[in-house]
């Protein structure tokens, strides 16, 4: 997809990664490394022409992801933290969530998310999308 041309461009994309997820004491922690590559189809003349107009459609990126969560008071309270960082574009997304059980099958959540940095990559496109929310979850 070309942001400059506003259309799709013939090519190939692959994405892969590796991660760990482990419980350490009262915490559950996870970390991932995600690698992406996007290449224009060199045999397609319109794709090659598009690359000359928008060189950003052919790129490689690495994203580092980390999370941690912990429950308290017999699992009636929970906090979670999540972060994604793209070192090539210096963009970051961080999110904090707190939840408390108000009774059987009723939870109140509060969360905030912050996007830092600008780029053509997914995290950088969301720079102005910071958020705060609360919600009441009822399971039945």
Image (cartoon, rainbow, N blue to C red):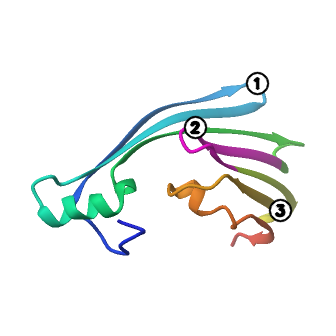
Circle 2: element type = loop
Magenta segment, which residues? 78-93
Between 21 and 104, the residue placed more toward the observer is 21
What percent of the width, then of the height, locates residue 38?
32, 49
Give residue 137's quadrant in the image: bottom right
Q: Is residue 84 magenta?
A: yes
**Is 116 placed above or below 7 here?**
above
Q: Residues within 10 Å of mark 2 (few under 14, many from 20)?
A: few
From the viewer's perspective, is 127 left or right of 19? right
| Of 139 and 16, the residue lying toward us | 16
Report if the CB atoms under discs 3 and 1 are less than 8 Å apart.
no
Distance in Å between CA atoms under marks 2 and 1: 30 Å
Residue at the image point whose x is 70% and y is 67% from the top? 128
**Residue at the extreme front of the image, as rendered:** 52
Q: Which mark is residue 25?
A: 1
Towards the viewer: 75 or 88: 88
Relative to 8, is 64 above or below?
above
Can residue 37 be found in the magenta stretch?
Answer: no
Q: Secondary structure at mark 3?
A: strand
The residue under the point 80% across, 42% down is: 71
Q: Which residue is mark 2?
A: 87
Q: Position of residue 67 (x, y in %)?
A: 67, 39
Residue 137 disc label: none
Residue at 12% across, 63% down: 45
The residue at the point 32 percent across, 74 percent down is 7
Residue 82 location (% of width, % of height): 69, 45
**Crowding near pointer 1: few (<14 within 10 Å), some, many (20+)?**
few
Majority secondary structure in the magenta region? strand
Please tell me whether residue 5 is drawn above or below residue 57 in the rendered image: below
Position of 100 compared to 6: left or right? right
């Amino acid at each position: 997809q070309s942001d400059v041309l506003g259309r799709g461009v013939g090519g190939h994309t692959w994405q892969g990664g590796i991660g760990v997820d482990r419980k350490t004491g009262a915490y559950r922690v996870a970390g991932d490394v995600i690698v992406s590559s996007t290449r224009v189809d060199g045999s397609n003349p319109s794709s090659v022409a598009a690359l000359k107009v928008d060189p950003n459609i052919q790129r490689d990126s690495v994203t580092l992801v980390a999370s941690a969560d912990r429950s308290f008071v017999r699992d009636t309270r929970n906090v979670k933290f999540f972060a994604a960082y793209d070192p090539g574009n210096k963009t970051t997304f961080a999110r904090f969530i707190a939840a408390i059980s108000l009774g059987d099958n009723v939870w109140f959540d509060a969360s905030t998310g912050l996007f830092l940095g600008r780029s053509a990559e997914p995290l950088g496109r969301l720079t102005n999308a910071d958020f705060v929310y609360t919600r009441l979850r009822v399971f039945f």
